[in-house]
Amino acid sequence: MKNHNLFATLRAAFPASLDEVAIETDNSLNYSWRDLDRATAMMANLLQSLGLPAGSRIAVQVEKSVEAMVLYLATLRAGYVFLPLNTAYQSAEIEYFIGNAEPAVVVCSSKNFGWVSKIAFKAGTQNVFTLDDDRSGSLLDRAAHCSDQHAVAVMQEDDLAAILYTSGTTGRSKGAMLSHGNMLSNALVLKDYWGWKKGDVLIHALPIFHVHGLFVAIHGALINGSKMIWLSKFDPKLVVKKLPEATVFMGVPTLYVRLLAEPGLNREACRNIRLFIAGSAPLLIETFNEWQQRTGHTILERYGMSETAMLTSNPYQGGERQGGTVGFALPGVSLRVQGDDGQLLAAGEIGGIQVKGPNVFKGYWRMPEKTAEEFTADGYFKTGDVGKIDERGYITIVGRSKDLIISGGYNVYPAEIEGYINDMPGVAESALVGVPHPDFGEVGVAVVIPKPGVTLDAGQMVAALKSKLANFKIPKQCFVVSELPRNTMGKVQKNVLREQHKRLFI
């Protein structure tokens, strides 16, 4: 019987010589393919020794490290469900995720063990381990006593491999359930579509709690048996220095903007690069053009979501990479644009983007009604993005159907932040809107109405949010006003607020 465990396919792609370097880190460590095989086996054995029920969730909030990646691979290998959490999340957020997902195991940084373990044990989690980015922590201490031989757990295509928390524009975060089949189908399509070949080397400079760094980048390199140059944090000077040793680079638009600020970025530095890929947020056409002029390379833009992994891509070869577009639907992905009345729209007309394919998720964790709502009768997922397809088939995303803000590649959902602001003493109402920003693409601006007779301090409100929420969610500016613009139905006109503040940072 074929094993559909994603790890089994990744492991089968390791080079014949397991002693070759698989990962080279920014602090001069080298990990061989044999190291990855043994380390994932030991960690998988540790997880299986805990006697966890089938389908157990392993929630992980740790700094980026090769060991953190090994934990992800070991979770797949052992047949459990990986649940990555942004390192910026604070206690209110972690409490919700742990309460909702009910993980059997929580892994956190040592510095956060005190408060994370309290939340986890209270929620009924039996096992809390630590893992730090200096190869220390109780997880590694325990795994060191386990065997380095492990038979990969046998999984079916539809078995759950990961839950990624995303958000609606209203209410709490939703856990998108991705199966082994979802992720494997996407990895195989991208291997072919992006022309991965023997000898490719990837610079990995992205976080690994997000689809882009965890799935697209890591799966891309591993399924091709390709070496990774592993950077714990994005450092533009170091990336420029390492470019001659690599052939593939993936980044969010913010990273490309920061690389363009480096005088060392030129055609010579990029001489061996085969492909620059951008995604997770819109790439400004100025960045696209300036990159072309400076490096002689045309960035390949693509589009994906937590619920679907990658959906579209500009062509690697055999076609033009069109700036401002996200290219064509990937092989196996069916993409359409529909009007509000459910009619298919003609080329160039703007409507809601809907998708179907083997990469599209199984639904939202423990939210059957929400899942049903997000799919059409004929099985298409309503992405919530608004876009158009031109006569040649190029897809352009023009916005979001709701008011999602994408800041530095991370999703910020206004309703969540507004909820925290509205709970503050003296606040009558608030609205958060996204405005253009030269570095982050978009940032949030909060507009707040005080209760009668109350004086609010905008700076203190922003400071209060910083103790509760991840930094990328914090409004970059806060205004206290007497009223918000409204339509005749009394609904806040966020488009008016965006217009008012659109030149704040540019």
Image (cartoon, grey):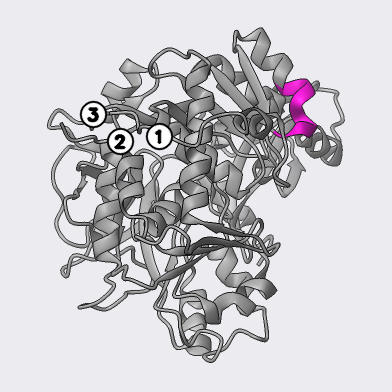
Name the quadrant of the N terminus. top left
The answer to which quarter of the image holds residue 86 is: top right
Q: Amino acid at mark 2?
A: Asn
The residue where tag 1 is placed is 77
Q: Residue at x 12, y 32 (%)?
A: 378
Q: Residues within 10 Å of mark 2 (few under 14, many from 20)?
A: many
Q: Nearer the viewer, residue 52 or 305?
A: 52
Q: Secondary structure at mark 3?
A: loop
Q: Secondary structure at mark 1?
A: helix
Magenta stretch prevailing secondary structure: helix
Q: Which segment did they paint magenta? A: 109-116
Q: Secondary structure at mark 2?
A: loop
Res 341 label: none
Residue 160 rendering spot, x and y as whole percentages: 34, 27
Q: Amino acid at mark 3?
A: Gln
The answer to which quarter of the image holds residue 261 is: bottom right
Q: Amino acid at mark 1?
A: Arg
Label 3 vs label 1, nearer the camera? 1
Q: Residues within 10 Å of mark 3 (few under 14, many from 20)?
A: some
The residue where tag 2 is placed is 5
Residue 81 in view:
yes
The residue where tag 3 is placed is 156
Residue 388 rendering spot, x and y as whole percentages: 26, 57
